Image (cartoon, rainbow, N blue to C red):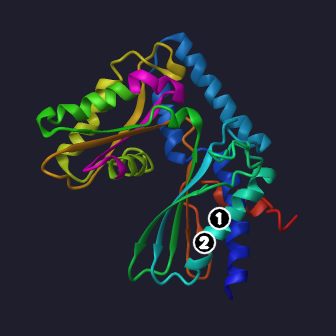
Amino acid sequence: MNNEEAKKILSSTMEKFIGLAATHLPDDVLAKLEECRAKETNEMQKTLYDAYFTNLELAKKLNRPCCQDTGLMHFYMTVGAKFPYIGVIEEALSDAVRKATFSVPLRQNTVNYFDERNTGDNVGERIPWFHWEIEPDRDDLEVIAYFAGGGCCLPGNAKVFKPSDGYASIVKAVFDTVSDLGINACPPLIVGVGLGTNMENAAVLSKKAYLRPLGTHHRHPKAAALEDALKDGLNKMGIGAQGMRGNIAAMEVHIESSGRHTADIAVGVNVACYAHRRGVIRFNSDLSYEIPTYKDAEEYMKNSKSTEEN
């Protein structure tokens, strides 16, 4: 298979996958929402969760996005150095986004800063956003597709603290972020916390944190304990679904970390909404694929048609 053929297959598959990820929530998110609904006690919260699930059921039935803000497409990719089509990935995924804008459809959200005009197809300056990790001795490609909506991006924050501020600065950064603008992101939230050495890597780590499967923990026991403590504390704030009074502000708190400089503590915080559209697709070197995040993925992909196939 040459690069041009591979690009067409990748683009066609990803266009359909974007449709799947826009209209279905991952299995782990749905299970967590069910768990959160069961823990709410007041009638307003029960009504809001009922509305969430009705919306999600209708999105699947009507094959329409489960949130009107389909965000901007972010792709977090782990690719083997031996994957044979590494040179066409970005072009293929950009083409898939362009086509999916009309076939799904996705809301046209992309505005280039200095043109101040909507591009009309969700492809613009460095958008879709690509984050790469290259692994030696592998020949496959894993893509995490994430729909970065405006309400979820709004609370995002990163700050560098002095070591004298101590690890209490981590807790303060998380609570300030969620209590200030977190309600704009449609709670209950997934809170990603990145601990690094500067704003850049702390912010990236916070994004990687909320893309983890729900219920997983940081590999270090102290960090895992902090994840649980932060979640318990956030859920005592009295914030529930849609920012109304409730018991569950955070579905999960996930932490990712790197080494830090002796002279600083960098904290990044990003949040994801209840409609956490995070889909994973894994391509083998022959471009066969698997989709682990949705139990009905095979049926959807079989029955869906890309722009090329219509």
Indicate the quadrant containing the C terminus: top left, top right, bottom left or bottom right.
bottom right
Cα separation between marks 2 and 1: 6 Å
* Residue 229 seen in render: no
Please report the residue visible at 67 percent of the width from the left and 46 percent of the height from the top.
110
The residue that label 2 is drawn on is: 89
Tally of numbered discs: 2
Q: Are marks 2 and 1 in contact (CB under 8 Å)?
A: yes
User: Could you say which quadrant of the image residue 143 lies in?
Assistant: bottom right
Please report the residue visible at 43 percent of the width from the left and 18 percent of the height from the top.
239
Instruction: Identify the amino acid type marked 1.
Output: Leu
Q: Tell me: 216 left or right of 115.
A: left
Residue 185 on image: x %, y %: 52, 30
Crowding near the residue tagged with mark 1, few <14, some 14–19, many ≥20 C-alpha atoms within 10 Å: many
Q: In terms of depth relative to the viewer, which is nearer, 301 or 179?
A: 179
Q: Tell me: 149 left or right of 181.
A: right
Residue 283 part of the magenta-drawn span: no
